[in-house]
Every structure is written in C-alpha cells, then in structure tokens.
Amino acid sequence: MKKSLQQKLMTYSLTAAAVVVAGSANAQVVHSGAINEHVTSQYAIDIDDNGVTDFYIGVTTSSTFYKSAYLMSPSSSTSVNQWLLSSHPNPYVADLDADVAVDASGSFTSSFRPWNIGWYASSSSNNNAFGGAGEKFIGVKFDIDGATHYGWIRVDVASDLTSLDVIDWAYDSYPGVGILTGQTTGGGPTLSSVTFNVDMTLAVDSIAFDPATDLVYVTGSFLDPTWQEPGTNAAEQQLLDADGDLIYTLVRAGVAAGDYEYKYFVGSGWDGGEWAGGDNRALTVADADVVLNDYWANWMVAVREIGADALIGPNPTNGLLKINLRGSFNVQVIDMNGKVVVSKEMTNKTEIDLSDQQAGVYVVRLSNNDGAASYRIVKK
Ligand SMILES: [Ca+2]
Ligand SMILES: [Ca+2]
C-alpha cells in the first residue's frame, strides 16, 4: 500500500518531533566540594543534595564471610541507582582511574544488597581492587525526577577494609549526559549542528523567486533571542547557494538538545514567509547533528517507491498543479469517484491544470517501469 501525501506529511511531523530531551540548556556538572568523610561503618551519599539518599557506602567486619567494603542502593525499589562493574570475578564495582567515561555505554548493574568494592574473606573470589589502592573512582548512575544522571564517587579504601574515605563526588545535572571520572566543571548538554537546506526550485515559478536578487532567510526558536526578524541577523539567518543548484544552505552550530520551530523567508521582514501565520516547521535536536532537507513552502516531496524524489504542489492547489521529477513517468489524476480526470506522460516536469475540476481531494498517481506511487492533494 502506497503512502498518501497526508501520510508523508504526518511522517515528517512525527520524525521531527520524535525525540524529546528533557532538561535545561544551562545544566552542567555539579561537584560536591570536599567531603573527606572517614567511614568506619556506613555513610549515606546524596549526590544531588535533594534530601534523598542515592547510595550507601561502608565497611563491615561483622561477618566472617562478608568482611568487605561495599556500595549499596538505598532501597530495593530503586532500580536506577547503579554502578559500573568490573568483569572479575563476580563482578565487582570497578576501581576507575581519572578521566574514564561514565555514560550510557558503561556496564552498569544494580542490587539492593551490598555490592562489594572489596572483600577478602573468600579465597575463591578474592577481589580487593580498591583496598590499599589509594584514591579511586566509582562510576554511578542514579535517578532525578525519573531521569537518569551519571556521576562518580571518589573513595580511598583501607587495604584491610576496616575503613574508607569518601573524598568527593560529582554528577551531570543534565539527564543522560555522561561524565568523566574526576570531572568537576563543564559538562551539560551535547551541542549539535543543524544544517538547513531549502530547495527553492519551484519558488522560481510560484513566487517569482529571483536567485539573482532575492535573499533567503530562516528564523525560529533555535536563535537567541528566538524568532529574530528575517534579515536582521544575516550571519545567523541567511542561507546561501554557492553552487547555484537552488538549494540554499545554512549551518547553525552549537544547538542544544530540544524542540524548536522554524520557518523560511524570502527577503527581509515578516512578509516573505513560506506561508502566513504561525504554523511553523518543527525541529528536534537530540544528541546528533541534524540535516534538514526542506522544500520551499507547501511543496511536497515523495516518490521513493519509484526511485526518485518528486516535488508535487502546491498542496492545496487553486488549480495549477506542478510536478518536478527526474525521469519519465505517467501521471494520472484521479477523483474521489475513481475517475481518471488527467492522464499524461511527463519527463522531468509538468503542469496539470485542475481549475475546471470540482473542489475536493484527488489522487496523483505517478508510475514508471519501477512501480507506482500515489499522493493525495486537495483542490480548493
Ligand atoms: Ca539524591
Ligand atoms: Ca546549493
């Protein structure tokens, strides 16, 4: 079943809004400052200082089997308070050096029961990496308001496991962003670049766009301040077409994760927008660079089913429907009763006059030897 134009439009919208990253663009690494707590039993660690204990760390010699230094989640229901594990032998909490990445790629596990950072009572699984090793880091992840945060805790465990010192800790207050062990500043959201590409090919006809004289701008909520008037900040708004293919490009660097809106304009001021009103384009930035391949105004792109990209529009149309498509195709326009009102062969581009047809929904069917694809358009 071929996707309708409406579905294509919906797919675009869903893609653009699919990923939502919570948090503030100003968030960053938060350091505990010097703690230097000498622990001979158990100590509660509240990494984000919100009054809720995130981990317990301690030593115990009360059991011959369980003579150990340990790290523990505060409750069995807290499944997100986890720590990086080493692989041997059980495994144990890894004794990390400085500058090790603590992030989503780490091998974390959690347990309500104490997880050893060192014990020596059992000869068959003797592991005491922390004991007597000096200052080492534990990589942790924990929960703030339902979102995962990464951090580290620096400890110095006595070689005989009768005491340990908690030196300090830190975490990134931006959810999902990793941290390096020992990192106490910086951090925060990953910044990405957004490449705006807008194809002005059909604007030459539809709005008499003149590449020799007309300037193309984009503005939106991705700017700071947001929605600067087109043309007032050319360095951050103007798209250029260096290679003359009518695809205008602007690369915007340093965009924080989040949801944004934007719109293209021809010429300075608010009058040259793709369409009137505040029905803006949507853009979502997560943790990767974004390349937008847009077409001016309400021209629709499609036809991957038949091995090419087409421009069909405008949609809705007042009568003159234009199709730009590389290659040779048969194009049919079919009304809601299934009647073929237009059938013609086209190569590269064509115009179809629907001004004598009744208002309503029509199907534009493009076909060649590779297959066929249908798109729904509205005649006003
Ligand atoms: Ca806490
Ligand atoms: Ca270009």
Image (spheres, rainbow, N blue to C red):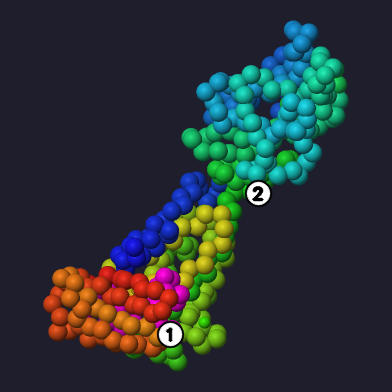
**Element assignment for label 1:** strand
Displayed quadrant of residue 311: bottom left
Displayed quadrant of residue 351: bottom left
Q: Residue furthest front?
A: 369
Q: Residue furthest bottom?
A: 212
Q: Which residues are magenta?
A: 303-327
Closer to the camera in the image, 288 or 304 = 304
Q: Is residue 87 magenta?
A: no
Name which residue lies at 42% across and 70% down.
305
Name which residue lies at 56% across and 31% down.
80
Q: Which mark is residue 186?
A: 2
Label 1 crowding class (10 Å Cα cut-off): few <14, some 14-19, many 20+?
A: few
The answer to whether 224 appears left or right of 166 in the picture is: left
Q: Is residue 324 magenta?
A: yes
Name which residue lies at 54% across and 33% down.
143
Displayed quadrant of residue 66: top right
Residue 97 screen position, x and y as percent: 79, 38
> Tag 1: residue type?
Gly
Name which residue lies at 31% across and 81% down.
331
The earlier-in-sequence mark between 1 and 2 is 2
Residue 278 screen position, x and y as percent: 30, 65
Vertically, is 352 above or below 231?
A: below
Q: Which mark is residue 327?
A: 1
